[in-house]
Image (spheres, rainbow, N blue to C red):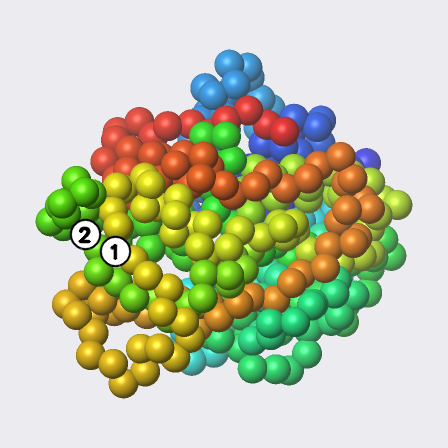
Amino acid sequence: MNDVILLTGATGLLGRYLLRDLTLRGVPMAVLVRDDRRQSAEARVESIIAGWEGSMGRPLPRPYILDGDLTAPGLGLDGDAVRWVARHCGRVLHNAASLTFQGADRGRDPWRTNVNGTAHVLELCAEAGVRSFHHVSTAYVCGQRSDIVTEDEPPRPTSFRNDYEATKAEAERLVRAAEFPGGATVYRPAVIVGDSATGYTSTYHGLYLYLQYLHLMSRFLPQGDDGRLHLPIRLNLTGDERRNLVPVDWVSAVIADIVLRPEWHGRTYHLSPDPPVTARELEEAMADYFGYSGVTFAGPGALDGADLNEVESQFYSYVAQYELYWASEPRFDSANTRAAVPNRPCPAVDAAMVRRLIDFAVLDGWGRGARKKRPVAGAPA
């Protein structure tokens, strides 16, 4: 009976939540995982499941482990493994991706994982007769747009901010060109941050770079007369720019809900906040947490040709790879998502959640293994 879901990317941040949420919904799971330099595929998966068991205080069934490599032809699987997939897996949830922004050439990441890896997964599906395909893309396959992006729009050649966006768009096009009897379902999350309840994360990208900079600077900034740290930074923003941030636990819960409801398959879903948080709201939350003042919104272009002070020079250098995302982001229409999961609104990334995200990151040493035992995430939705 082929009721097993094969999940890729199970060891990443979203993947470990998907593994938990689908397992708790009674779905038999298989995972494609490779050995890393420190642990075997089996040990990596066991660590994740044991972590969830510790946080929930209950045992969980183990997934079937396919020891393979997304970037290898045939996923590095032998004939017996392919036959096992054909007998047991009616659905594939392809979540694995490289978050590398720029690649030296198409033989390296993010091209190798995001495009070649997706092609390899689709080839396995064709060989094994997988009937239903679920693909985790990104809302940013739209490229550099600031208007309304609808869920029904396929990715098209456009101007991308980086190779990551370009490769995810190309991968989504491959998925849409493939044929599945049960259809292909595409999920497009916005920028994923940590757990809404606990702040837990296992990766530190995007927003976390800004938070880490402020955490580092808070150790060295002088105090002003008002007793607050002085951070003299002019931002080339108005403050009204949208920031599409979504917590990982919500993204996983929405995907798990839709995966198990065939009547909603074959569609595309934007997993985006409504409304988005603004740049000003984020800055106010960070200023409150770190106790600084002095940041101002100078407006777009205000710093062109201007002399930057030392703190500004450090700041813009630190966050340079994300500067193209500073302009106001698109509005992601999410009509399909609202219709499919009307009772699961996205938690607001407000000041309280920002505080939880920072608290966890500081406690975790910004992912540097500051604690021998990492905190576990919160309860499933």
Q: Which residue is mark 1?
A: 294
- Label 2–label 1 contact, CB within 8 A: yes
- Within 10 angstroms of label 2, few (less than 14), some, or many (20 or more) residues? many
Question: What residue did someone put label 2 on?
Answer: 230
Tell me if 133 is positioned left or right of 98 in this view.
Answer: right
Q: Position of residue 237 (x, y in %)?
A: 42, 68
Residue appearing at x 50%, y 26% in the figure? 378
Numbered tag placed on residue 30 in the rendering: none
Q: Is residue 258 left or right of residue 67?
A: right
In the image, residue 118 lies at what x, y percent? Answer: 61, 64
Q: Residue at x 81, y 36 (%)?
A: 1
Q: For the point 65% across and 63% down, which residue is it?
A: 331
Q: Amino acid at mark 1?
A: Gly
Q: Secondary structure at mark 2?
A: strand
Horizontal and vertical percent position of residue 283: 38, 52
- Secondary element type, mark 1: loop
Q: Dividing the image into 4 quarters, which one contains the C terminus?
A: top right
Question: As shown in the figure, which amino acid type bears the numbered disc 2?
Answer: His
